[in-house]
Image: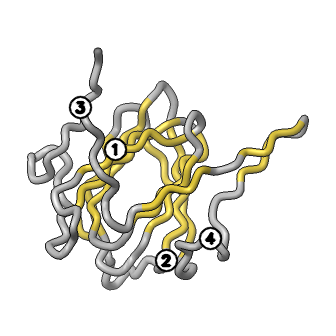
Amino acid sequence: MAASPMIDGVQIKRLKVIPDERGFLMEMLRCDDPFFQKFGQVYATTAYPGVVKGWHYHKKQTDHFVIVKGMMKVALYDDREDSPTRGTVNEFFMGEQNPILLVIPPGVLHGMKGIGSEPAFLVNCCSEPYNYKEPDEYRVDPHDGTVPYDWSRKDG
C-alpha cells in the first residue's frame, strides 16, 4: 500500500537528542525554525494506553506537537475545502522511539492515541493562547465514522 502524501501545510522536524551521563537534552521548537509563526502558549497533556483523544481542529491556531515521554499514534485528516490534499489521512508514531516535532496547520483535524504500556506525555507549543470565552476548538467524534480513520490497532 502506497503512503499518503503529506497533508498540505503539515511539517516534521527531526529532533536531535543530546545524551550525556547526566541525562539528555532535546531541543523542540526554536524561533528561528522556518515554520515558526509566534508564541501563544505551551501545555502538556497525557494519554493513557489505548485512549483516543480527538478529533478536533482549530480555525486560527497552529499546533507544534512533541511527545516527550512514551509513544503516541497521532492521526491527521485534511477536510479543508480549499486544500490540494483534501481527504488525505496522515499517521505518525511519535515519542521516545521517534523524536519529532509535528506542525499541524489550522483546519486540519487531529487526534492522538496512547500506545504502549505507559501513559504518553505530549507537549504542544501552539501559536495562540487558549481563549476560555471563545475557544478555537471544534470537535468531531473519534468513532462515529465522520472521519475515514480507524483508531484500532493494526496487527499482522
Residue ID at (55%, 82%): 38
Disc 2 secondary structure class = loop
Q: Quadrant of residue 101?
A: bottom right
Q: Earlier in the sequence, mark 4 or mark 3?
A: 3
Residue under pointer 1? 91
Q: Earlier in the sequence, mark 2 or mark 3?
A: 3
Image location of residue 132, percent across then percent down: 38, 80
Disc 1 secondary structure class = strand
**4 or 3: mark nearer the eye:** 3
Nearest the viewer among 32 and 46 is: 32
Neighbourhood count class around disc 4 (C-alpha, 10 Å): few under 14, some 14–19, many 20 upward: few
Residue under pointer 3? 1
Cα–Cα gap, marks 4 and 3? 33 Å
Residue under pointer 2? 127
Looking at the rendered structure, the kind of residue marked 4 is Asp
Looking at the rendered structure, the kind of residue marked 2 is Ser
Residue ID at (24%, 69%): 138
**2 or 3: mark nearer the eye:** 3
Residue 77 is marked as none
